[in-house]
Amino acid sequence: MAEQIINIDRMEHMLALFGSFDENVKILQNEFDVTILGRGSDIKVTGEPEAVSKSIRAIEGLLSLLNKGEALNEQNVNYVIMLVKEGNEDQIGTLSNDCLCLTAKGKPVKAKTLGQKKYTDSISAHTVVFGVGPAGTGKTYLAVAMAVKAFRAHEVNRIILTRPAVEAGEKLGFLPGDLQNKVDPYLRPLYDALFDMLGAENFQKYQERGNIEVAPLAYMRGRTLDDSFIILDEAQNTTHEQMKMFLTRFGANSKVVVTGDITQIDLPDPRKSGLLEATRVLKNIDDIDIIRFTEKDVVRHKLVQDIIRAYDKYYEEGKKR
């Protein structure tokens, strides 16, 4: 058995490190099979030498987040633990990067994983970016945050959000109301992200002025979109023709982000997904970048990571069979 003591300079960091009802420390103890005790300004870690060493590195990583003003929660505690286990704890400092923008309630929006950081950096650096990966990785939310950031900085005059109106394995029948009422259910996730960033009143104001447009993909045909930040969501459900049409719409001083999850294709023939084709056709073109997320970038409940991992394993075993 080994024992190591680490001193915490600030008592508020000690309290934040342990968390409510010691929830953060319990995660560390379960993951590394160690015992962690707090005495005054000291933390004592006891267990097998390697486990103690990893625990100390994880604690130091969490303290570095606290020193940069980050709040600890189950998601970033588990993510730091994963980085330590992979030997990548030196990259923990990049998690507490600059705020992308503030929500309507004043909450800062930041990249929470290395994959998300790479994604937001790529959006800043490239004209067209594809964000491909599983649910819960923040593909759409971060893209909307970057669009709002560019709009507030007067880098673009419009934010345009679109997605194909494809039912997710269900037959919804004829929806009531006018054309806008019929397509709104398909666009609800985009509305939710914009409401969060701008607030309902500002969203309504900008939409009436034409600064923000949320529309189905069919509305994009025949248009040239200058000075715009354009986001195509759920792109895995585009056909080859729709994707090509969309990618030839943007004009001068515009930026395009395409998001999708190739494991959730709702087309009758998944092989005809425009997203699948585009990532193969455009992978070597300058100023176009393709960011691939994994289950490690999931920032929803930890169980979502386990579900994605289980499905991936099941499909891989199915291919072998």
Image (cartoon, helix red, strand yellow):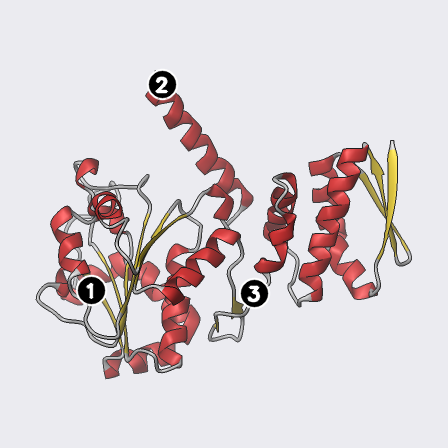
- 276 vs 209, nearest the viewer: 276
Relative image position of residue 78 (x, y in whole percent): 62, 46
The residue that disc 1 covers is 181
Q: Is residue 252 above or below residue 269?
A: below
Disc 2 residue crowd, few under 14, some 14–19, many 20+, Cα 10 Å: few
Find the distance from the CA under tag 2 to the CA under tag 1. 45 Å
Residue, x 41% and y 74% (percent of image)?
149
Left/right of residue 23 with respect to residue 45 in the rendered view: left
Find the distance from the CA under tag 2 to the CA under tag 3. 41 Å
The residue that disc 2 covers is 320
Q: Nearer the viewer, mark 2 or mark 1?
A: 2
Could you tell me the amino acid type at mark 3? Asn
Q: Say what secondary structure mark 2 lies in.
A: helix
Dot placed on the residue nearer the N-terminal end, 2 or 1: 1
Residue, x 41% and y 32% (percent of image)?
312
Relative image position of residue 74 (x, y in whole percent): 62, 50
Q: Say what secondary structure mark 3 lies in.
A: loop
- Residue 85 is labelled as none
